[in-house]
Image (cartoon, helix red, strand yellow):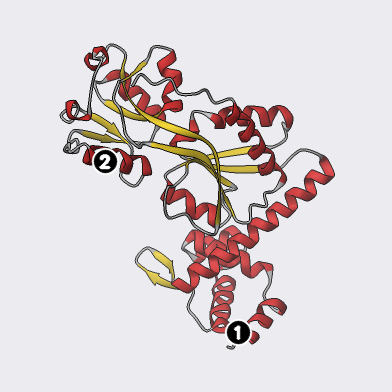
């Protein structure tokens, strides 16, 4: 089918039900599960999917041992289908806001740097101003959150902004620069040392972020720059709750953004080691889909984040 005929078919005959169908099959990886979620019969969904593929002239899904897997064509079509559905949800939210006042929902993806600092303050401020807004927070790594943001499952992602490889499909707003510190439990033998370097810590147990995180790559680069072998006794975790307990109950050295560690340091639970980490300081901010037109609830939260970021205390690192 020519591009002109395909465009006419999508404009005149393609229905919202088709969009929902492709998105559900993509998410469920199963016609049966998708049909149940859509309250349709399995043969109806199967026939509609076959008709769509026949009209497009390309396969959208292929069968595998794990169910249906999207083809490269299916990945493209499903991504646009999910964006269309997200935009329609946003349209419904705007209409409801106009009709009933402050309401709606905002879904935020957060990386480690934003979870324990400005996000709670911003949410508290938002709920004071707009108690009817529902807020969902999804914690994850960059490689997991970015695809969800691009397809419209998330309104924004908060955390350390990437230094390289920024996408033209996204917008990046910086709030403040976040240094990184090394922390240990209160009373740790190393906390009594006035001078330390990475060379003194290579054989210690470490609690590090996951390998696919930007922070982990920066820490490894710091070791390489110092000509120090990477630690071998390592626990890998991005769970803040798990990390806080592990640090308090073991002799692990943890790597934390300064403002994530600050509360525990001020309450005497953790101590910051006097280790200078060269070049491990990254901007923290929000990542949005371009062109950045947010629905009202998400826009209100973004403004609250800007306000909360202005109150972030300056680092007081003993270096």
Q: CA distance from mark 1 to mark 2?
A: 49 Å
Nearest the viewer among 41 and 242 is: 242
Q: Nearer the viewer, mark 1 or mark 2?
A: 2
Report the quarter where the N terminus lies. Answer: bottom right
Q: Is residue 309 left or right of residue 207?
A: right
Q: Residue at x 53, y 59 (%)?
A: 168
Q: Residue at x 21, y 36 (%)?
A: 226
Q: Residue at x 62, y 67 (%)?
A: 19
Q: Is residue 210 visible?
A: no
Q: Give above or below for 105 relative to 41.
A: above
Numbered badge on residue 208: none
Q: Quadrant of residue 232?
A: top left
Look at the numbered disc 2 and give the secondary structure of its residue: helix
Query: x and y percent of residue 220 in the render?
Result: 26, 41
Q: Give above or below for 20 relative to 313.
A: below
Query: Disc 1 marks which residue?
Result: 3
**Mark 1 touching mark 2, by CB under 8 A?**
no
Query: x and y percent of residue 235 in the render?
Result: 26, 34
Query: x and y percent of residue 54 in the render?
Result: 54, 83
Query: Disc 2 marks which residue?
Result: 220
Nearest the viewer among 261 and 50 is: 261
- The mark that comes first in sequence, 1 or 2, is 1
Look at the numbered disc 1 and give the secondary structure of its residue: helix
């Amino acid at each position: 089918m020519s591009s002109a005929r395909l465009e006419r078919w999508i404009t005149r005959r393609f229905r919202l039900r088709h969009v929902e169908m492709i998105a559900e099959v993509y998410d469920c990886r199963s016609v049966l599960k998708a049909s149940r979620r859509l309250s349709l019969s399995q043969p109806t969904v199967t026939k509609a999917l076959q008709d769509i593929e026949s009209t497009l002239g390309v396969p959208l899904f292929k069968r595998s041992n794990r169910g249906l897997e999207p083809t490269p064509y299916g990945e493209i079509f499903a991504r646009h289908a999910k964006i269309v559905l997200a935009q329609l949800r946003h349209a419904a939210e705007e209409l409801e806001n106009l009709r009933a006042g402050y309401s709606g929902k905002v879904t935020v993806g957060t990386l480690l740097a934003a979870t324990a600092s400005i996000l709670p303050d911003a949410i508290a401020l938002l709920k004071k101003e707009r108690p009817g807004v529902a807020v969902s927070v999804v914690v994850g790594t960059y490689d997991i959150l970015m695809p969800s943001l691009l397809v419209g499952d998330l309104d924004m992602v908060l955390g350390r902004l990437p230094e390289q490889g920024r996408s033209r499909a996204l917008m990046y707003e910086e709030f403040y620069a976040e240094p990184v510190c090394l922390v240990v439990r209160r009373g740790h033998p190393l906390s009594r040392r006035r001078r330390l370097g990475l060379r003194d810590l290579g054989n210690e147990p470490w609690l590090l972020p996951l390998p696919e995180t930007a922070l982990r790559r920066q820490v490894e680069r710091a070791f390489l720059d110092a000509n120090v072998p990477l630690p071998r006794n390592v626990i890998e975790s991005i769970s803040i709750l798990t990390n806080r307990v592990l640090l308090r109950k073991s002799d692990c050295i943890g790597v934390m953004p300064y403002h994530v560690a600050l509360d525990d340091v001020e309450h005497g639970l953790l101590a910051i080691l006097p280790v200078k980490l060269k070049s491990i300081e990254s901007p923290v901010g929000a990542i949005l889909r371009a062109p950045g037109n947010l629905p009202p609830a998400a826009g209100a939260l973004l403004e609250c984040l800007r306000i909360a970021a202005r109150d972030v205390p300056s680092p007081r690192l003993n270096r």
